[in-house]
Amino acid sequence: MDIVTYDGSMEGLLSAVFEVYEYKIPDPVICVRSAANGSLFGQFHEVHSNTEKTNRVYKKLSERLSKTSMLQVYSTFLSGLPGMENILLRYIQYVLASKQSVEYDYSHPDVLFVQQTSKKVHREKHRMEAFIRFQVTQDQLYYAIIQPDFNVLPLINNHFRKRYADQRWLIYDSHRKYGLYYDLETVTEIEMNFDIDVKHTKSVATLNDTNEELYQKLWQQYFSSVNIAARKNMKLHIQHMPKRYWRFLTEKQVQFNEEF
């Protein structure tokens, strides 16, 4: 067994796939370099991201897969699930070895995994697009703090750039310690260590504009006024809006503080 390490990026993973073929590695196990464990019975093969190698693998895949399936591969990578690199390697090997299209061959466990995982990631993407609530800081930067189950920031980039094109904004993933910053022209990926405790809204509120608390109360009052108590179905409500998102939703702050 050979341990193939890469830098954790999609480009690095495709470069690793290329080198598995290039060096004819018989029994590879791909993992992120920082998480690699020593093996008494295997050798280490370190992969450095290479644009040319990445493009060659991408081009070959795009000839065999539809745009939908290509997006499924990327979404599976963004899931960050343990062992997903090796599932994607086997998936790619299966695709390239087959003379006919296999993207709908759900009898194959790796094809099924990619299809099911991409659905989960895109469900989280749509939830983030619906549930993100911005607050405004004293210097008029609109920011939102999120903790999605999967790394969906690359998938929601275009949605927020188009929808909020006239204001500066920052969406920060506090779990993965990076965010997207829009400066009215371009969206930039930034890494930062946000020291304020995001679990407590009072600590975050110190950043806010003086009118932000008023706006939040107005939104909470509006949400309360349109709510029909007689038609309340909490089971269905939680199904569509799981409690893990409540701490970041302005309209749920009171209820979140009461329950947690």
Image (cartoon, helix red, strand yellow):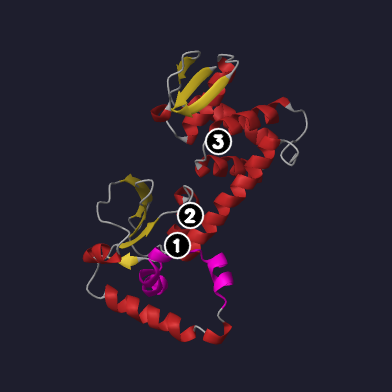
Question: Could you say which is closer to the camera, residue 11 or residue 111?
Answer: 111
Identify which amino acid the numbered label 1 is placed on: Tyr
Residue 210 is drawn in which quadrant?
Answer: bottom left
Describe the element under mark 2 as helix, strand or loop.
helix
Measure the C-alpha gap from mark 3 to mark 1. Answer: 25 Å
Identify which amino acid the numbered label 3 is placed on: Met
Q: Earlier in the sequence, mark 2 or mark 3?
A: 3
User: For the N terminus, which image quadrant?
Assistant: top right
Identify which amino acid the numbered label 2 is placed on: Ile
Q: Which of marks 2 and 1 is nearer the N terminus?
A: 2
Is residue 256 highlighted in magenta? yes
Relative to 224, residue 108 above or below: above
Question: Could you say which is closer to the camera, residue 156 or residue 3?
Answer: 3
- Depth check, mark 2 against mark 3: the one in front is 3
Residue beneath label 1, please? 245
Q: Is residue 134 left or right of residue 103?
A: left
Describe the element under mark 1 as helix, strand or loop.
helix
Q: How crowded is mark 2: few (under 14 residues within 10 Å), some or many (20 or more)?
A: some
Residue beneath label 3, please? 84
Q: Residues within 10 Å of mark 1 (few under 14, many from 20)?
A: some
Relative to 102, residue 206 above or below: below
Can you tell which mark lies on residue 156?
Answer: 2
Question: Could you say which is closer to the camera, residue 142 or residue 166?
Answer: 142
Q: Earlier in the sequence, mark 3 or mark 1?
A: 3
Measure the C-alpha gap from mark 2 to mark 1. Answer: 17 Å
Relative to 228, residue 62 above or below: above
Measure the C-alpha gap from mark 2 to mark 3. Answer: 21 Å
Residue at the spot x=59%, y=44% of the render?
71
Range shown magenta: 233-260
Q: Which residue lies furthest to the right in this view?
A: 100
